[in-house]
Image (cartoon, rainbow, N blue to C red):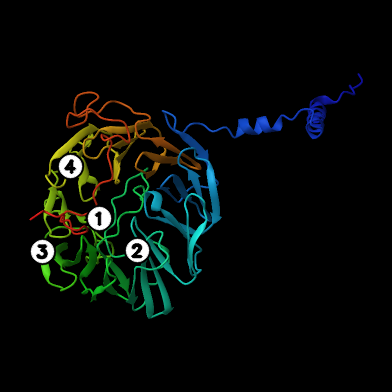
Amino acid sequence: MAKGSGLGVRGWLLLGLTTVVALAATGVWNPFPGMWDWVNRRSPISEPDLVWQQRIGGTPRSVTIAGETVVVEQRTRVEARSLATGSQLWERKADWSAVAGGGAEAVVAVGRLLVKGYEVLDPTTGVTRRRDNDAVAVWTYRNLLLDARCVEATDCTLSAWEPRGVAPLWTAFLPGVSSGLLADNPNLLDSRRLSSPRIHGEVAGPETVPALLGFPVDGRVHVVDTATGRVLQDVEPGRDERLAVIGGRLLRIVARSQDGNCYFTISGRDAATGQETWQRSGLNLRTADSAGCVQREDPYGARNVLVGVAPDGREAILDGYDGRLLLATENSERVLAVDDRYAVVRTAGRDGISGRELSSGQVRWNRPSGEKAGAALTPYAAVVADEKPNRLVALDPRTGRELVALRTSANALAVGPAGMVIGEGREIGYIRFGAASGDPARNGDPGRNGDGSVPGPAGSPGAPGPQGTCGPKNELCDAPDSGK
């Protein structure tokens, strides 16, 4: 029997593909854009859906809300997107970027690794507002930008700028810089934040510059007054000491090894005179590892407060300015997040979290959570990340009122005055506070705040504003006029 002479399956497929290509080339019919749109179609990364969701070129290293824009730092470039629509406003090649200032005064500092200098960009247009060709390091804050430049290895100057300023506010001499002082926000001797899965470490954005900063230089610590630029102290730590500058004080943390244990003593000193102002013993600030009590880490904390472990295993929060005990947890409770006004604590049963006010020790709110829930505190909201089921929730830190509740496995990347940016892989999106919510507040009447008041929409007087940055002892702000 003779074999057939037909084209066969492969032949017909080749003929069909050739026909489609010919039709597309002549403009008669082109199915490829529709097919690509179908392949590239984005699935919502949360429920309820976001105000907008966009796919960016790579996984973001950091995301910051700067005024009416969202600044996205990637491995080799930085871009800005509209906060309202998510559309790209501009893009620049850069190895690092950091946002200074807040609101309408925000700027973006960008630079290249191993290359001196940086540029200060407008976050909306990407236009260069100021250019520097000599700086080796930049630190960004909500109200200040600092940079360091060195003529020689032992001849460096530190300069302070208003975020949109064109002339430095002050300059200070530093006898060299640490080899680690490169690019944006290199480590200073202060506190390290408590971390949480699915919440980015920089979710709060730039904070107000502390009253004092500690710069490590050749094994010594130079304490700089950020209001005047005056170098107040040049201190060398002892062999069993670690120094940190927190809450307007120079802290000396001594770890002594005895009987197989580490014994700690913490003292706060006036940076101008060196006089001791307070001392506490027995609180482990988690600065030492198990090998001979060598202290290699900064203490945990935020702004003006420290988090440590008491001898009985309970966690404690201290005021760095005067050493006051602001909060002592119960047995098996754990501090998940802290700033100088509030703390978020996982309850002893590991089935709930609570918000605590540090000034009074009062429990402001409670809500159920999973065993692995994490949290972070920002100037505008407390963020809670929960698992099984996956949730991201933003709360008023004072009342526990839900500002937004999302069913999502995405990460919280940035929080601003009116909403939150989340992301998963290359997808990022923005949700406004009040645009979507889950269950009513769980610590009072349904539909009411924890204090019994009726919540208002985001942006109304009932919505949270930025938390104060004066510190527990008002050391960062001028005392108000009492009229006396």
Crowd around label 3: few <14 · some 14–19 · many ≥20 (10 Å): some
Q: Quadrant of the C terminus?
A: bottom left
Q: Residue furthest front?
A: 483
Label 4 or label 2, whichever comes before in sequence order: 2
Q: Are marks 1 and 4 in contact (CB under 8 Å)?
A: no
Report, in whole angstroms, how far the alpha carbon at label 2 lies from the one at label 1.
Answer: 15 Å
Point out residue 417 in the picture as x, y percentages from the top left corner. Answer: 34, 42
| SS label for mark 1 | loop
Mark 2, residue position: 187
Point out residue 147 in the picture as x, y percentages from the top left corner. Answer: 39, 67
Residue 456 in view of the camera: yes
Report, in whole angstroms, how far the alpha carbon at label 2 lies from the one at label 3.
Answer: 26 Å
The circle on residue 303 is 1
Report, in whole angstroms, how far the alpha carbon at label 3 lies from the one at label 4.
Answer: 25 Å
Q: Nearer the viewer, mark 3 or mark 4?
A: 4
Q: Nearer the viewer, mark 2 or mark 1?
A: 1
Crowd around label 2: few <14 · some 14–19 · many ≥20 (10 Å): some
Report, in whole angstroms, how far the alpha carbon at label 1 lies from the one at label 4.
Answer: 17 Å
Q: Residue furthest right?
A: 2
Q: Amino acid at mark 2?
A: Asn
Query: Where 133 falls versus 367 (above or below)?
Result: below
Q: Nearer the viewer, mark 1 or mark 3?
A: 1
The circle on residue 356 is 4
Crowd around label 4: few <14 · some 14–19 · many ≥20 (10 Å): many
Q: Are marks 2 and 1 in contact (CB under 8 Å)?
A: no
Label 1 or label 3, whichever comes before in sequence order: 3
The circle on residue 414 is none
Q: Amino acid at mark 3?
A: Gln
The circle on residue 279 is 3
Left or right: residue 9 versus residue 99 is right
